[in-house]
Image: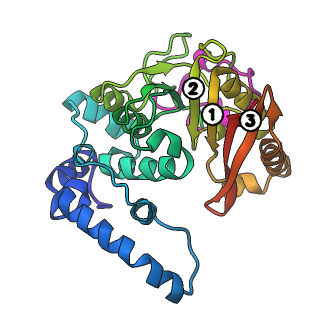
Amino acid sequence: MLKLNHAELIENERARPADHRKGHDGYRRKMAALRDTFFEQFLTREARRHPSNDEIIAAFGDLPPADLAVPYDLTPEGLEHVSRCVQRKYVIHFKNIRRCWALLLQHMPELMAEGCAPREVLEMSTAHGATLEILRRKGHRVIGNDFANFVGGAALDSRYRDFNGSDLTSARDDHGLHDGSGVVRDWPYRPITESLGLDVRLFDAGSGPYPFADKSLDSVICFDAIEHYCHPRDWIKVVGEFTRIARRSVLVVPNAVAPHDAKRKDYIEAVYAFQRDMRNYSDDGWACVHAGVLRNQLSVFKLMRLG
Protein backbone atom coordinates (compact mmCIF):
# COMPACT_ATOMS: atom_id res chain seq x y z
CA MET A 1 0.00 0.00 0.00
CA LEU A 2 2.86 2.38 0.77
CA LYS A 3 4.14 2.07 -2.81
CA LEU A 4 0.80 2.77 -4.50
CA ASN A 5 0.08 6.19 -5.98
CA HIS A 6 -3.25 8.03 -5.62
CA ALA A 7 -4.84 6.38 -8.67
CA GLU A 8 -3.68 2.90 -7.64
CA LEU A 9 -5.06 3.39 -4.13
CA ILE A 10 -8.47 4.23 -5.58
CA GLU A 11 -8.41 1.18 -7.87
CA ASN A 12 -7.30 -1.01 -4.96
CA GLU A 13 -10.31 0.18 -2.97
CA ARG A 14 -12.57 -0.58 -5.92
CA ALA A 15 -11.22 -4.15 -6.04
CA ARG A 16 -11.44 -4.62 -2.26
CA PRO A 17 -14.56 -2.83 -0.97
CA ALA A 18 -14.37 -2.03 2.75
CA ASP A 19 -10.69 -3.03 2.61
CA HIS A 20 -11.62 -6.72 2.74
CA ARG A 21 -11.15 -9.44 0.14
CA LYS A 22 -14.81 -10.45 0.61
CA GLY A 23 -16.10 -6.88 0.47
CA HIS A 24 -18.46 -5.26 2.97
CA ASP A 25 -19.95 -8.62 4.02
CA GLY A 26 -16.48 -9.82 4.94
CA TYR A 27 -15.83 -6.60 6.83
CA ARG A 28 -19.11 -7.01 8.73
CA ARG A 29 -18.21 -10.59 9.75
CA LYS A 30 -14.72 -9.51 10.79
CA MET A 31 -16.14 -6.75 12.97
CA ALA A 32 -18.65 -9.09 14.62
CA ALA A 33 -15.85 -11.52 15.46
CA LEU A 34 -13.73 -8.66 16.78
CA ARG A 35 -16.53 -7.47 19.04
CA ASP A 36 -16.95 -10.99 20.47
CA THR A 37 -13.31 -11.05 21.61
CA PHE A 38 -13.41 -7.84 23.64
CA PHE A 39 -14.49 -9.27 27.00
CA GLU A 40 -11.83 -11.98 26.90
CA GLN A 41 -9.19 -9.45 25.85
CA PHE A 42 -10.11 -7.23 28.79
CA LEU A 43 -9.23 -10.07 31.16
CA THR A 44 -6.04 -11.21 29.45
CA ARG A 45 -4.39 -8.24 27.72
CA GLU A 46 -1.55 -6.70 29.67
CA ALA A 47 -0.31 -4.02 27.29
CA ARG A 48 -2.48 -0.91 27.44
CA ARG A 49 -3.08 1.00 24.22
CA HIS A 50 -5.68 3.14 22.56
CA PRO A 51 -8.31 1.23 20.58
CA SER A 52 -8.25 1.34 16.80
CA ASN A 53 -11.09 2.81 14.78
CA ASP A 54 -12.34 -0.67 13.92
CA GLU A 55 -12.26 -1.69 17.60
CA ILE A 56 -14.31 1.40 18.53
CA ILE A 57 -16.85 0.70 15.78
CA ALA A 58 -17.06 -2.96 16.73
CA ALA A 59 -17.66 -2.06 20.38
CA PHE A 60 -20.64 0.07 19.37
CA GLY A 61 -21.89 -2.61 16.99
CA ASP A 62 -22.87 0.12 14.52
CA LEU A 63 -20.99 -0.30 11.24
CA PRO A 64 -20.69 2.07 8.27
CA PRO A 65 -23.00 0.83 5.51
CA ALA A 66 -21.90 -0.79 2.27
CA ASP A 67 -22.76 2.22 0.11
CA LEU A 68 -20.01 4.20 1.88
CA ALA A 69 -17.45 1.45 1.16
CA VAL A 70 -16.81 2.52 -2.43
CA PRO A 71 -13.92 4.58 -3.85
CA TYR A 72 -14.18 8.24 -4.74
CA ASP A 73 -15.42 8.86 -8.27
CA LEU A 74 -12.91 11.41 -9.55
CA THR A 75 -12.39 12.78 -13.03
CA PRO A 76 -8.87 12.54 -14.48
CA GLU A 77 -8.46 16.26 -13.76
CA GLY A 78 -9.71 15.77 -10.20
CA LEU A 79 -7.32 12.87 -9.63
CA GLU A 80 -4.41 14.96 -10.89
CA HIS A 81 -5.43 17.77 -8.53
CA VAL A 82 -5.61 15.61 -5.39
CA SER A 83 -2.40 13.81 -6.36
CA ARG A 84 -0.63 17.19 -6.10
CA CYS A 85 -2.39 18.52 -3.00
CA VAL A 86 -3.69 15.70 -0.79
CA GLN A 87 -1.83 13.09 1.25
CA ARG A 88 -2.19 9.59 -0.18
CA LYS A 89 -3.94 8.17 2.89
CA TYR A 90 -6.83 10.60 2.46
CA VAL A 91 -7.88 9.30 -0.95
CA ILE A 92 -8.99 5.97 0.57
CA HIS A 93 -12.70 6.63 1.02
CA PHE A 94 -13.66 3.90 3.47
CA LYS A 95 -10.64 4.63 5.68
CA ASN A 96 -11.84 8.23 5.97
CA ILE A 97 -15.37 7.02 6.71
CA ARG A 98 -14.22 4.64 9.46
CA ARG A 99 -12.11 7.31 11.16
CA CYS A 100 -14.96 9.83 11.24
CA TRP A 101 -17.59 7.19 12.07
CA ALA A 102 -15.63 6.20 15.19
CA LEU A 103 -15.27 9.83 16.33
CA LEU A 104 -18.96 10.59 15.81
CA LEU A 105 -20.13 7.45 17.60
CA GLN A 106 -18.10 8.40 20.67
CA HIS A 107 -18.56 12.15 20.84
CA MET A 108 -21.74 13.04 18.93
CA PRO A 109 -24.07 10.09 19.64
CA GLU A 110 -27.12 12.36 19.48
CA LEU A 111 -26.40 12.80 15.76
CA MET A 112 -25.77 9.10 15.13
CA ALA A 113 -28.73 7.57 16.98
CA GLU A 114 -31.37 5.67 15.02
CA GLY A 115 -34.35 7.88 14.29
CA CYS A 116 -32.67 11.01 15.66
CA ALA A 117 -34.21 14.35 14.78
CA PRO A 118 -32.59 16.10 11.81
CA ARG A 119 -30.12 18.81 12.78
CA GLU A 120 -28.23 21.56 10.97
CA VAL A 121 -24.50 20.90 11.30
CA LEU A 122 -21.42 22.87 10.26
CA GLU A 123 -18.07 21.13 10.09
CA MET A 124 -15.03 23.40 10.05
CA SER A 125 -12.16 22.36 7.75
CA THR A 126 -14.17 19.47 6.37
CA ALA A 127 -11.29 18.24 4.12
CA HIS A 128 -12.43 15.01 2.39
CA GLY A 129 -15.94 15.45 3.74
CA ALA A 130 -16.41 12.05 5.42
CA THR A 131 -18.02 13.58 8.52
CA LEU A 132 -20.53 15.41 6.34
CA GLU A 133 -21.22 12.29 4.28
CA ILE A 134 -22.02 10.32 7.40
CA LEU A 135 -24.25 12.96 8.95
CA ARG A 136 -26.06 13.59 5.66
CA ARG A 137 -26.82 9.90 5.45
CA LYS A 138 -28.25 10.12 8.97
CA GLY A 139 -30.70 12.74 7.70
CA HIS A 140 -28.98 15.92 8.86
CA ARG A 141 -28.50 19.10 6.85
CA VAL A 142 -24.76 19.57 6.56
CA ILE A 143 -22.46 22.43 5.58
CA GLY A 144 -18.68 22.31 5.37
CA ASN A 145 -15.97 24.93 5.55
CA ASP A 146 -12.55 24.77 3.94
CA PHE A 147 -9.67 26.92 2.76
CA ALA A 148 -6.29 26.60 1.11
CA ASN A 149 -3.23 25.57 3.15
CA PHE A 150 -0.93 28.08 4.87
CA VAL A 151 1.14 25.87 7.15
CA GLY A 152 4.74 26.37 6.09
CA GLY A 153 4.92 25.87 2.35
CA ALA A 154 4.25 29.56 1.82
CA ALA A 155 5.83 32.56 3.51
CA LEU A 156 2.89 32.96 5.89
CA ASP A 157 2.23 30.21 8.48
CA SER A 158 -1.33 30.38 9.77
CA ARG A 159 -0.56 28.28 12.86
CA TYR A 160 1.30 31.05 14.68
CA ARG A 161 -0.67 34.19 13.81
CA ASP A 162 -3.23 36.01 15.95
CA PHE A 163 -6.92 35.45 15.39
CA ASN A 164 -8.03 38.21 13.02
CA GLY A 165 -4.37 38.84 12.33
CA SER A 166 -2.91 38.11 8.89
CA ASP A 167 -5.22 38.17 5.87
CA LEU A 168 -4.61 34.90 4.03
CA THR A 169 -6.50 35.99 0.94
CA SER A 170 -3.68 38.43 0.20
CA ALA A 171 -1.01 35.70 0.31
CA ARG A 172 -0.09 32.74 -1.89
CA ASP A 173 -1.07 29.34 -0.46
CA ASP A 174 1.12 26.25 -0.10
CA HIS A 175 -0.08 24.59 -3.32
CA GLY A 176 -0.45 27.67 -5.51
CA LEU A 177 -4.22 27.22 -5.74
CA HIS A 178 -4.81 30.96 -5.51
CA ASP A 179 -2.43 33.81 -6.12
CA GLY A 180 -3.06 36.15 -3.20
CA SER A 181 -5.26 38.49 -5.20
CA GLY A 182 -7.94 38.43 -2.50
CA VAL A 183 -10.15 35.90 -4.29
CA VAL A 184 -10.14 32.30 -2.99
CA ARG A 185 -10.49 30.18 -6.11
CA ASP A 186 -9.64 26.65 -5.02
CA TRP A 187 -8.72 24.33 -2.16
CA PRO A 188 -6.97 20.94 -1.91
CA TYR A 189 -10.00 18.65 -1.44
CA ARG A 190 -12.32 20.32 -3.95
CA PRO A 191 -12.54 17.38 -6.43
CA ILE A 192 -13.50 14.98 -3.63
CA THR A 193 -16.16 17.14 -1.98
CA GLU A 194 -17.59 18.16 -5.35
CA SER A 195 -17.84 14.51 -6.41
CA LEU A 196 -19.86 13.89 -3.24
CA GLY A 197 -22.17 16.87 -3.83
CA LEU A 198 -21.29 18.51 -0.51
CA ASP A 199 -21.96 22.16 0.33
CA VAL A 200 -18.55 23.58 1.27
CA ARG A 201 -18.14 27.29 2.04
CA LEU A 202 -14.71 28.88 1.54
CA PHE A 203 -13.59 31.26 4.28
CA ASP A 204 -10.57 31.72 6.54
CA ALA A 205 -11.36 30.22 9.95
CA GLY A 206 -8.63 32.34 11.52
CA SER A 207 -10.62 35.50 10.79
CA GLY A 208 -14.02 36.41 12.19
CA PRO A 209 -16.84 36.90 12.28
CA TYR A 210 -17.73 33.85 10.21
CA PRO A 211 -20.45 34.26 7.54
CA PHE A 212 -23.25 32.79 9.67
CA ALA A 213 -25.83 34.50 11.84
CA ASP A 214 -26.00 34.01 15.61
CA LYS A 215 -27.57 30.67 16.62
CA SER A 216 -28.19 29.80 12.98
CA LEU A 217 -27.07 26.14 13.19
CA ASP A 218 -27.58 23.36 15.71
CA SER A 219 -24.02 22.07 15.98
CA VAL A 220 -20.47 22.99 15.00
CA ILE A 221 -17.79 20.30 14.70
CA CYS A 222 -14.04 20.89 14.32
CA PHE A 223 -11.81 17.81 14.03
CA ASP A 224 -8.00 18.15 13.86
CA ALA A 225 -8.11 21.68 12.50
CA ILE A 226 -8.19 24.49 15.07
CA GLU A 227 -4.40 24.36 15.40
CA HIS A 228 -4.16 25.52 11.76
CA TYR A 229 -6.23 28.66 12.35
CA CYS A 230 -4.04 30.64 14.73
CA HIS A 231 -1.75 30.46 17.77
CA PRO A 232 -3.30 28.51 20.68
CA ARG A 233 -3.47 31.68 22.79
CA ASP A 234 -6.39 32.65 20.52
CA TRP A 235 -8.10 29.26 20.09
CA ILE A 236 -10.69 30.25 22.67
CA LYS A 237 -11.65 33.18 20.41
CA VAL A 238 -12.25 30.67 17.60
CA VAL A 239 -14.46 28.63 19.93
CA GLY A 240 -16.33 31.86 20.67
CA GLU A 241 -17.27 31.97 16.98
CA PHE A 242 -18.45 28.36 17.18
CA THR A 243 -20.68 29.04 20.20
CA ARG A 244 -22.01 32.22 18.60
CA ILE A 245 -23.21 30.24 15.58
CA ALA A 246 -24.46 27.08 17.31
CA ARG A 247 -27.73 26.61 19.16
CA ARG A 248 -27.07 23.24 20.81
CA SER A 249 -23.56 21.76 20.76
CA VAL A 250 -19.93 22.31 19.78
CA LEU A 251 -17.29 19.61 19.44
CA VAL A 252 -13.63 20.61 19.23
CA VAL A 253 -10.86 18.02 18.80
CA PRO A 254 -7.45 19.66 18.31
CA ASN A 255 -4.70 17.63 16.70
CA ALA A 256 -1.92 16.33 18.92
CA VAL A 257 0.69 18.98 19.69
CA ALA A 258 3.72 18.43 17.47
CA PRO A 259 7.00 17.67 19.29
CA HIS A 260 8.69 20.86 18.04
CA ASP A 261 5.76 22.96 19.31
CA ALA A 262 5.71 21.13 22.66
CA LYS A 263 9.27 22.36 23.21
CA ARG A 264 8.19 26.00 22.81
CA LYS A 265 7.28 27.39 26.21
CA ASP A 266 4.87 30.03 24.90
CA TYR A 267 3.07 27.50 22.71
CA ILE A 268 2.62 24.68 25.22
CA GLU A 269 1.58 27.07 28.00
CA ALA A 270 -1.06 28.50 25.65
CA VAL A 271 -2.30 24.96 24.92
CA TYR A 272 -2.59 24.22 28.65
CA ALA A 273 -4.47 27.49 29.15
CA PHE A 274 -6.86 26.53 26.35
CA GLN A 275 -7.46 23.12 27.94
CA ARG A 276 -8.25 24.79 31.28
CA ASP A 277 -10.55 27.36 29.67
CA MET A 278 -12.43 24.66 27.74
CA ARG A 279 -12.93 22.45 30.80
CA ASN A 280 -14.36 25.46 32.64
CA TYR A 281 -16.19 27.02 29.69
CA SER A 282 -19.11 29.18 30.76
CA ASP A 283 -20.62 31.76 28.45
CA ASP A 284 -24.18 32.49 27.30
CA GLY A 285 -25.48 29.26 28.82
CA TRP A 286 -22.68 27.08 27.40
CA ALA A 287 -20.80 24.56 29.53
CA CYS A 288 -18.29 21.78 28.93
CA VAL A 289 -20.11 18.45 29.26
CA HIS A 290 -17.25 16.18 28.17
CA ALA A 291 -13.45 16.40 28.11
CA GLY A 292 -11.49 13.42 26.86
CA VAL A 293 -7.99 12.14 26.17
CA LEU A 294 -7.05 11.22 22.61
CA ARG A 295 -3.53 10.33 21.43
CA ASN A 296 -2.36 10.73 25.05
CA GLN A 297 -3.38 14.39 25.16
CA LEU A 298 -6.41 16.20 26.54
CA SER A 299 -7.88 17.04 23.17
CA VAL A 300 -11.61 16.30 23.11
CA PHE A 301 -14.00 19.01 24.27
CA LYS A 302 -17.75 18.97 23.92
CA LEU A 303 -19.73 22.06 24.83
CA MET A 304 -23.50 22.24 25.13
CA ARG A 305 -25.88 25.10 25.72
CA LEU A 306 -27.52 24.23 29.03
CA GLY A 307 -29.04 27.58 29.91
Magenta extent: 152-175
Whether the magenta-drawn stretch holds residue 104 is answered as no
Q: Measure the C-alpha gap from mark 2 to mark 1.
A: 7 Å
Q: Is residue 80 left or right of residue 185?
A: left
Q: Residue furthest front?
A: 115
Badge 1: few (under 14), some or many (20 or more) residues near its Cα, within 10 Å?
A: many
- Residue tagged 3: 235
Q: Are marks 2 and 3 in contact (CB under 8 Å)?
A: no
Q: Earlier in the sequence, mark 2 or mark 3?
A: 2
Dot 1 amino acid type: Ser
Residue 249 is labelled as 1
Q: Identify the residue at horizontal 45%, vertical 47% (top origin).
A: 100
Q: Are marks 2 and 1 in contact (CB under 8 Å)?
A: yes
For residue 142, which quarter of the picture?
top left
Which label sits in the foreground, 2 or 3? Answer: 2
Q: Identify the residue at horizontal 36%, vertical 75% (top origin).
A: 36
Q: Is residue 21 left or right of residue 296?
A: left
Badge 3: few (under 14), some or many (20 or more) residues near its Cα, within 10 Å?
A: many
Q: Is residue 110 left or right of residue 306?
A: left
Dot 3 amino acid type: Trp
Above or below: residue 284 compared with residue 306 = above
Q: Main secondary structure of the magenta part?
A: loop
Q: Quadrant of the C terminus?
A: top right
- Residue tagged 2: 218
Secondary structure of the residue carrying tag 2 is: strand
Q: Is residue 194 left or right of residue 254?
A: left
Which residue is at the front of the view, 219 or 234?
219
